[in-house]
Amino acid sequence: MTYPLGSNRYGKIGVHLATVARDADRHTFTDIEVEVLLQGDFAPAHVDGVNADVLPTDTMRGTCTALARDGVDPVADYARRVAERLLEASPAARSVALEVVTTPWERLEVDGVGHDHAFRPAAGGQQVLWFSLERDGEGPVVEGGVRGLKVLKSTGSAFSGYPTDRYTTLPETRDRIMASTVEARWGTRDAAVDHAALAHAVPATFCARFATHDESESLQHTLHAMGSAVLEAHPEVTWIHFRMPNEHHNTADLAPYGLDNPNVVFVVAGPPSGLIEGTVHRPGVEVPARW
Amino acid sequence: MTYPLGSNRYGKIGVHLATVARDADRHTFTDIEVEVLLQGDFAPAHVDGVNADVLPTDTMRGTCTALARDGVDPVADYARRVAERLLEASPAARSVALEVVTTPWERLEVDGVGHDHAFRPAAGGQQVLWFSLERDGEGPVVEGGVRGLKVLKSTGSAFSGYPTDRYTTLPETRDRIMASTVEARWGTRDAAVDHAALAHAVPATFCARFATHDESESLQHTLHAMGSAVLEAHPEVTWIHFRMPNEHHNTADLAPYGLDNPNVVFVVAGPPSGLIEGTVHRPGVEVPARW
Amino acid sequence: MTYPLGSNRYGKIGVHLATVARDADRHTFTDIEVEVLLQGDFAPAHVDGVNADVLPTDTMRGTCTALARDGVDPVADYARRVAERLLEASPAARSVALEVVTTPWERLEVDGVGHDHAFRPAAGGQQVLWFSLERDGEGPVVEGGVRGLKVLKSTGSAFSGYPTDRYTTLPETRDRIMASTVEARWGTRDAAVDHAALAHAVPATFCARFATHDESESLQHTLHAMGSAVLEAHPEVTWIHFRMPNEHHNTADLAPYGLDNPNVVFVVAGPPSGLIEGTVHRPGVEVPARW
Amino acid sequence: MTYPLGSNRYGKIGVHLATVARDADRHTFTDIEVEVLLQGDFAPAHVDGVNADVLPTDTMRGTCTALARDGVDPVADYARRVAERLLEASPAARSVALEVVTTPWERLEVDGVGHDHAFRPAAGGQQVLWFSLERDGEGPVVEGGVRGLKVLKSTGSAFSGYPTDRYTTLPETRDRIMASTVEARWGTRDAAVDHAALAHAVPATFCARFATHDESESLQHTLHAMGSAVLEAHPEVTWIHFRMPNEHHNTADLAPYGLDNPNVVFVVAGPPSGLIEGTVHRPGVEVPARW
């Protein structure tokens, strides 16, 4: 028998492009990695092997590349042009979703001054922009985010007062290292906000709060403080979701060697990690379901 | 102001355990990596820094480890015991979700015979079991899957008849290499089926169909054939979802060197890749939304 | 001033090719990744920016690709043709060194029979061939090897009788899991041996010895037994070098949970690992220095 | 028969530690990963399974951890203490070699000011220190280096005037992007220099030269300029070796889409990469052989 096709999508992942704005001697270098996925009525391709409606993923790659000729800054504008073109090129598609990951590069320093055309990747992780557009929808949904933003504080973090049972071995602590590689994703009031500005400002805000939240009782507690700081500082942001692994730095047990360890030497542990995920939002705002 | 906490969860990831069944001289070696996540009412921890309801993720790790003492085979039974214990240990949790990734090991051969207690990882990817349990729900939801299952066919794959536009450069072909690293996930009629048996049988079925589907017009076409073969062969499976990147092996252009290339030499391309995702299901079956 | 150029080399890395032998319905699929490096008099390029003697690395890539048209099996023959061509194409080169990494693929099974043209990567790691040729030398040096060959034994391994000091915490054991991801490299009596046959046979030999060496007192002890078995079984092999990380599987401490653990549950530890490297050779044979 | 043991070494890899200097409110956070390898007379362990002279690698880990109690800054001093202790603890060892990889962290900014105890990894790669000590040698050999230092220039790089043959397809260019992930390693006049200062200063020097070397005819040419700049600026450095993959950013071919591309859009290529390695040294200085 012929079994029905359920939810499906297809597209291209890993389209890695760079652009150089050369209008002046002082170049701007931009490094993006694009993923594009279409949804629509693609049952004929799956069920019958008919490709008449299947825009090749290679054409998606070509489209991303060609449209970069008019610039990829700001990324939200570039994403819109790609999305609109793909809906045009693929009548069978009902919607298109882009993810654009920007790796920020900073200028190499020569005699204390940033160079005109030499660069290195900046600290602080990658910026992400999600842009989705429905053919018959009201307008695009644009969300911003960050990935790979590693942070650590060497004090101002506690974990105690938790329930214990027969499988508990963790000792309580009022002073520990807290570290995470933050992934964040946020929504805004409307799609017209300055997403490029927020891509810098939102992480700056929550990193500062991470630093100053010295009354932290848990990673959960700090996550909520970070989210609240973002909503406080950025009126256009309506919700923010964090995925924060708890990357354990365990106080080394030096007692077997006859040594004390007043939180001076730590073992940087690999997996397993804790994992905390949570969304902080303005009252009354509808937040996309996460899982 | 105090901003509300939206959807959230927390737990432990990367709990990597192995067990040895030593009842007989012929050992069984099992290698699992467990992820466990709780959902429930954890707002006090986030908003107020009160940990009274926060079962430490270290206790989750300890629970996974201790319960392995009674064996981890079959994995679905082990997952059930861990899930039930965690709901017991964390009254604030409404639900618990486990992901258990099994790396299959096979026996090393000595004089053509599998050895009693020496092993190497087997070919064919990792097995995944998802087990989720709600405190007030009807019963667990158990799904099976596979990850990292790389397959390739050197002929019997075409791609032509697709729409073209100004961004098309891909030539049509009636004979190409098709390759993918398959991720699959499937649901079953009820939780009581033999998940361990399916973990072997379902990939065997869809790999065989991948091999024999020589009339393939696209990766989509083969995906549907693979899913259909699974539903045909395994009555207890009600739907199957595939995530299949199209890992391009491009026919090398040898013309600049004055050579022909009748599909003999291929350049194994890295990113970008195509990506095809799709679900095949029995009629009338409710399939979990994918995105 | 002009500073002298010391030791230097250049070339291309990561040339990933596949070939399909299609002479019969039953295809042969070969997957190789090539690295090629030239040494010679390239000071003019470095010091003066003169490229007259610099064969572009893109030409090396093209050469590897074009010469694959005549087949890449056996790999040692293919490597020889590439090496000879590159010395011809680059008069400034005194020597050329190739590394060819083969990923073995095996046939997908359909109804218990290996399929004619569908494949998956085989278990057991990758094969490596090193081929180096000097313009004025006596002949090529060809060495074989393996990479990523993970092995584990669940008993038959001890570690005790070692010296202790104030930094010792490890308990002695007469029964533990021993696991490693083996890298091996071996030399042969002359370049004319059947390197392709050895690439299969040598790992089979040392894996079998790994399995049966149940009197193991240490990873060092087993390494030497593995090397000895290879020299015993393969007269053409004159030395073999192993790099074997000791990938710890620690017996889980279940005492805090009130449970015993008679070597049944293990924590698969990540880094740090032990690392053992050693060469076993025939008496009187000159072995290349390793470091 | 008993086959002889050739060159061998053993030790511990991946000992990942962090220290917090808490003497003042303004903390210093240091993150190191240590590898330690012993060479000596370990044939009894290999050949006879006698462990009387085998200092366990777990004890090496413990030693690295315990000695961190007295601080790991400067790294060269810490390495010396570990090395001396290990020679003491292992009479069978003739020499010990340490590699210490430091990941630099920088302060998180709060209101434009670096925070006292919150950090993120800095841009610019990791610092490496190699420290080796022979029991009967003259003194330690200490070398510095850097790893993972990614750099790119958007103009000021050419590649032309190279020889062509039948396998040439690369077009000449007088303006291209040049990018690499630099690994460097350098030697100094004596072991007593300020290695911590050089770890910052040497990369700063060669990165600046990378930026300003706008007459670059090749990666080789720039490598030599970078090395020369280091020798010019740092009298204590006697040689420097670079490993620089040529990470291709290809000018996108937009002609099929009817567009020009005056070096504005680039495809960030993955493998294959070029690879250039070279040493620049002071006249008359003996440089360690590289391969």
Image: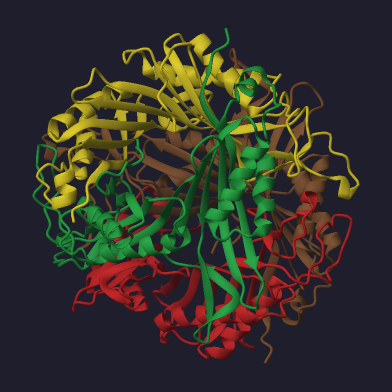
Chain colours: A brown, B red, C green, D yellow
Q: Is residue A179 above or below residue B91?
A: above
Q: Position of residue C113 (x, y in %)?
A: 52, 84
Q: Nearer the viewer, residue B244 or A86?
A: B244
Q: Residue at x 14, y 35 (%)?
A: D90
Quadrant housing the C terminus of chain D: top left
Viewer can see residue D276: no
Q: Quadrant of residue B208?
A: bottom right
Q: Residue at x 48, y 18 (%)?
A: D202
Q: Position of residue B288 (x, y in %)?
A: 57, 75
Quadrant housing the N terminus of chain D: bottom left
Q: Residue at x 82, y 61 (%)?
A: A87
Q: Nearer the viewer, residue D192 or A195?
A: D192
Q: Quadrant of residue D181?
A: top right
Viewer can see residue D85: yes
Q: Nearer the viewer, residue C48 or D209?
A: C48
Q: In the image, is A108 to the left or to the right of D135?
A: right
Q: Position of residue C230 (x, y in %)?
A: 30, 58
Q: Position of residue D13 (x, y in %)?
A: 31, 42
Q: In the image, is D108 to the left or to the right of C83?
A: left
